[in-house]
Amino acid sequence: MRRAGKIPAVAILCTAFRQGRIALMLLFCLCGFAQQAVPTANRFRISGTVVNSVSGQALAQVRVFLSLPQQIEDREVVMTGPDGHFLFDNVPAGKYALGAAKPGFMMQAFEAHEMYSSAIVVGPGVSAENLLFRIHPAAVISGQVVDEQNEPVREAQVLLLKNRLQGGKRSVRQADQTTTDDRGQYRFGSLAPGTYFVVLSARPWYAPFTAFANSSDGGAGQTAEPNVPRDVTYPITYYPGATDLSQATPLTLAAGDHVSADFSVTPVRSLHIHVRTPKPNATEGCSVVATPEASQGVDLRLPIPLQTTMNKPGEVDVSGLPPGQYRLQIVFPGREATTYTQDVDLQSDIDIDPGAGDQSRIISGSVRTQGESRLPPGAGVMLRSNSGQIAMARITPNGQFQFDAHAEIPPGSYEIALNTDNMFVVSVSGTGASVSGRTIQIQGSTLIRLSIVVAQGFARIEGMAVSGDDKPIAGAMILLMPADAANNEILIRRDQSDSDGTFTLPSVVPGHYTLLAIRNGWDLEWMNPAVLKPYLQNAESIDVQRSGKYNLKVLVQ
Amino acid sequence: MAKSVAQALLDQGKLPAQHAFEAPLLYFIQCIHMSLRLLIALLLLPNLSQAAQLASNAAANPATAYSLSGTVQNSVTGEPIAHALVQLSGELAESAFTDTGGRFEFDRLNAGLVGLSTRKPGFLDPLDVDPNLPQPIVRVGADVPPVVLKLVPEGIVFGRAQKPDGEPIGFLTVQVFYSHIMDGRKRWDLMNSTQTNEDGEFRIAGLKPGRFYLQAGPRAQPTWIGAPGQRAREAAYRPMFYPGVNDLASAAPIDVAPGQQVEADFSLSPEPVFRVSGTIVGLPADEDADEIWPRVQIVSPATNTTITPVGEQPGNNFRAKVPGGSYIIRASVDTPRGSYRGEIPITVQSDVTGVNLGLLPVPPLQVEVSVQSSRPQPSSGRQRGEQVSLRLLSQSMKVPASEYGFTDRTAANPMSAVEPGVYAVEITPISGDFFVDSAQCGGTDLLRDNLTVGQGSVAPIRISLRDDGGILAGIVMGDGRPAKGTVVIVPDRAPRQIKTVVVGTSGQFQSTKLAPGDYLVLAFDRLDGIEYANPEVLSSYLSNATHVSVAANSESRVSANLIRTLK
């Protein structure tokens, strides 16, 4: 069962474009409880015990939530008793989402994996009693940051990266962010078991007060004040003291673990970037944003304070960066502001000459609909990067779209999708970027034109995961793999079989697929063809027709 | 330039707003602050010619043979502070760190005046704590004795929020308020705000010594209550002042001395919530529903504090959950076409649905400035229009003072949609030799009475300026000698349009552009911390006040007795 239904997911996506409202929207999703009384005679019971997943101990005062899968806002809540027992009686027949929360524990759905969980099914002849609901005690990473004087570093930015298996791929992604307090201490609580990295970005407390003075002579060689380092910053540091993710020590946390990760930082000279303005004698400078990039394609969402100074007309000095890899985005103001983006491996001072031309990348194209379907108002084309960042362009009534020239769309691989619920991408072709399936590869070209064909008519697959002797299997991973999955990730559909073995794959784009059910499939890197290969031999192929409805039995492997 | 980088980061949404401007702005403010202090200090030096001579000596003999040394100390314990940054201001922008014994030394300095400042995380500049302290200034030369610089250790408030059964309350908003006196008026400000962690703990550092009030709640995540094994209800934490009271009046203050760490724990009980939902009506039909993001708040009428922030969602509907009680639902919508505001009282004892919350367009503040000039005006000068600045000062917590500028040509300032409330209005002519002759809003005399802004439109504010004001000149006397201080000039007919004049050691002062009429004149040794705009506070000083009349186009003279407030 999908825990978050399609509708909330889209709603969250839309709000993501309105800054800062995501949190509120999520909050709203978590609220609410059902009070409606359904006046039918057939009532069933859902009961069980909540236990600590580590100790097996029964847990009292746990809030246990029950709701219809698509209506998690309307939920009933009970408190477990001293024996950890919970009971919902008077439950009408149906499928229900079950969840639990308690301070000090992760808020969890029943048998949750990624965004999927097993729904509880009750009805005539199907009871759901004596469920064992294991919840993980929350893990914590905390630590202290000290400087070269062994004194606490305040307001250091601390990032938590998580090595996670999601969508069949293992990747490292930013999971949380915090700042140190007056004691130099930070803390990431409410962590699920897993493998984490901690990254630190800070600058010396005295840097803002010493960097500006006498900056015209570069700051170095001030004999009069030998004990004050000028123009310095702290390196971006991966726990325990590495300058790159590949050298960092992973912190592997079991449920309930409390791990310390302390940092000790010493300043390095901040590196300088000399930017030549497009107009040779411009007296207006530019604004520069540097996004640090870890290896393995991880963007670190770390604001690094930079100083820009006009050295002389036409040349801007940018300082404040420790050595490392960055994506630099330079905006030259003016009536027609120009944006220049460059990836740099900064190990010494460098010069950048963006040239006279505007380096902004223009991505535009047209959308054609198949059949008689029409795009709904507000429809847009989305580009989704490997790291999950999304750029969107509205489609005009005559089917044209163009991405904002200042949108951050660096070179890389992007999936093309629509922001609407009822239409899908049939095919993509284009110039200026190489296209395979529904994925485009953006390289140096600054002019990209795409032709996208879209259509209506999602299919729907329902079914049951069964064992060799035809018994329903709960909690299996259901996977619908398209041909050429690597370039058509957006077509993949997944579910987790519910307590009666049933599953639902809604919104399937017509085409050729392989349907699999894998017990314990949640630990597989199934996007790796070599990993999936042994399972494909025993899987069934299926040709999904437009608007088709299917009901299938799948053998659990 | 630094600002534009921050702006770029902001534009990209990579930086929370406070962060973007903190570092550069702080720096600039500090620079300005420091140079202003130095300037003032230099101006106030009794013997300027001596200073000038020193400077010229230095120019004539540019030997850099002098040194300056000293220590940095904790102002409370007297202990030396290691690794503090000491900076010289002025032309020699030099820096040094103190050693482990708190000592610093600068070598090869030119002779002359130099300002000193020091900083260190965990400590506050004494001048930020008490602006009346002198800025440390040293005359560099031969045989300068070591300098002692002090830093005030910060205060810290920390604590834990838990339920009566001991379960920690995480994700609880904690806010620190303080009252202070600014421009003679007492006002409440938010000092800092934070959230408890999963263990219910919070910690707020960097506090100046003073008196603070703590408020905890609401919680950023839903809460449920119920007996073991029973059905649970959703609940919420009503915002409470320390140690657990509803209103500020009965709250216990938290007094933080320099360097003190004060623990303030909260024990809070969640209260069951009821659902409140409704529709916002009164928006023009042609507004694009997707573009409407109403801000809805449910506030307690007694304390004006937000009980529940309502999740923003597009369109005209709102839903919220609040504990039982009487509240005001307040909504505001800002669209490109204008702003809308509305509020409605509700009493919640069970679920409330179908609330119709009517919004009205908020017309901008209308101000009409008229000028009566007794002198012939050059025609070009009149083109510009005479400007007044209007300050609206709310006494309510969480509503900061707003300032608007108007000229006699601008009938309305589109930026000035004023939130409902009661305001003291300060009107200051910016240009020319003008004083405010009258200021009316409907039937209200704004020179005497508060401006009440309700729902809907505010009557135009009519301000009349004249230029035949008088001059008040005088001297401040303390212990029979001229004394420095600050003079407060209170017009009888307009007790809130108060003027203040800083007086140097000569004791002489002058104030121009005064409306003809009677005045009270008071002279204080220091003005900060004195609520002189409050008539009750002022009345306690009346025995030391001097009465004086000012006539049009003429000068009156007065001698004012220094009122000593410093120990």
Image (cartoon, rainbow, N blue to C red):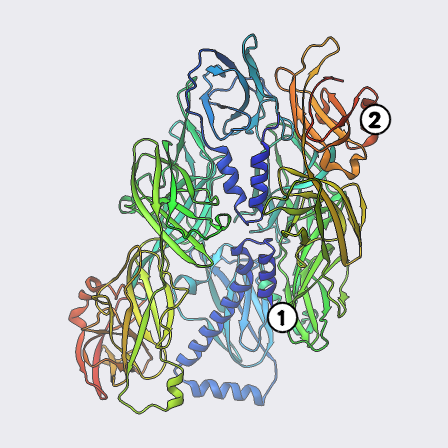
- The crowd level at tag 2 (other Cα within 10 Å; few <14, some 14-19, many 20+) is few
- The crowd level at tag 1 (other Cα within 10 Å; few <14, some 14-19, many 20+) is few
Q: Amino acid at mark 1?
A: Arg
Q: Is residue A447 left or right of residue A120?
A: right
Report how far apart the C-alphas of labels 2 and 1 lie in the structure.
56 Å
Q: Residue B51: where, in percent of width, then height?
A: 46, 84
Q: Residue A377: where, in percent of width, then height?
A: 58, 47
Q: Residue at x 41, y 38 (%)?
A: B319
Q: Is residue B42 left or right of residue B528?
A: right
Residue with the mark numbered 1: A335
Give the secondary structure at mark 1. loop
Q: Amino acid at mark 2?
A: Lys
Judge by depth and name the residue closer to the eye, A199 or A399: A399
Whether residue B249 is situated above or below residue B390 in the rendered picture:
above
Q: Residue B163: where, in percent of width, then height?
A: 40, 31
* Residue B252 visible in the shown view: no
Quadrant in the picture for the N terminus of chain A: top right
Q: Residue at x 70, y 57 (%)?
A: A322
- Quadrant for residue B559, please give it: bottom left
Identify the subunit bearing mark 2. A
Judge by depth and name the residue closer to the eye, B145 or A171: A171
Judge by depth and name the residue closer to the eye, A75 or A145: A75
Q: Residue at x 66, y 62 (%)?
A: A288
Judge by depth and name the residue closer to the eye, B515 or A83: B515
Disc with the residue nearer the chain's start (2 vs 1):
1
Whether residue A356 is situated above or below residue B431 in the rendered picture:
above
Whether residue B54 is situated above or below residue B37 in the rendered picture:
below
Quadrant in the picture for the C terminus of chain A: top right
Q: Residue B118: where, in percent of width, then height?
A: 51, 64
